[in-house]
Image: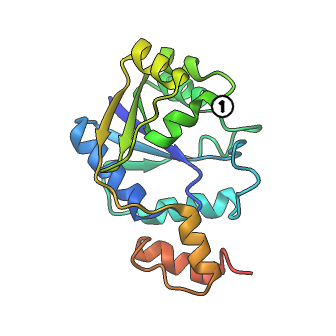
Amino acid sequence: MQVGLFGGTFDPIHNGHIQALKAAYRILSLDGIVLVPAGDPYLKRSRLIASSEDRYNMATLAVKKIPFVEVSDIEMTRSGPSYTIDTVKKLKEEGYEITVLLGVDSIIEMDKWDDPYSLHYECEVVGLSRPGFQGDKSQPFMARQKQFSLRTIEVNSPSISSSEVRDLILRGLDVGELVPKSVNEYIRKKKLYHL
């Protein structure tokens, strides 16, 4: 079974994430998508606001009606920092063939990871790009692209960021157009991202 591993902090999950995973599923002809909220996203600790439980709950609500998406708590139940390579290895042990789906900006940031090459050796990594996104021309990225024949697909997702959503909520503005309705209701009920 060929599945796309779509991980992230999802703080909160938004319509851009949903559009991207739907497009990746279709374009790559995947059997399914495993959505993995990071338990301890070590590169974003200073910015993390919602608990891992709240982020998991929002992700579950967001994809409830999408039959090919499964939300996994695999990184939340594992202690220590969340490393994608550990998640990939565990899912492969369970019999999945994995394609890691990362925003192109995250692929560029892979050079900050402890060991960016190990993931490429373990599975295919596909970059998800928005229209008009300018790729990275840095030497480390270009070297990885050449060595591993990195594929990039255009997913035509809206230009939304989780930080933008949090900022709008903090300012008392409506985010109903940016996040799924169920997520918006959850945020309001739990008073997430408010002072």
Question: 101 and 61: which one is in front?
Answer: 101
Write down the quadrant of residue 128 in the picture. top left
* Furthest-bottom residue in this view: 172
Question: 135 and 52: which one is in front?
Answer: 135
Q: Quadrant of the C terminus?
A: bottom right
Write down the quadrant of residue 110 in the picture. top right
Q: Is residue 24 above or below residue 55?
A: above
Residue 12 in sight? no
Residue 32 pos. (x, y %): 33, 41
* Amino acid at circle 1: Lys
Q: Residue at x 50, y 34 (%)?
A: 107
Q: Quadrant of the N terminus?
A: top left
Residue 113 pos. (x, y %): 65, 29
| Apparent side of residue 175 relative to residue 22 in the rendered image (left or right) | right
Q: Residue at x 67, y 38 (%)?
A: 82
| Apparent side of residue 194 relative to residue 141 in the rendered image (left or right) | right
Q: Residue at x 55, y 47 (%)?
A: 8
| Apparent side of residue 83 relative to residue 14 in the rendered image (left or right) | right
Question: In the structure shown, which secondary structural element does the residue marked by tag 1 occupy?
Answer: helix
- Please name the residue that numbered disc 1 is placed on: 112
Q: Is residue 184 above or below residue 55?
A: below
Question: 155 and 51: which one is in front?
Answer: 155
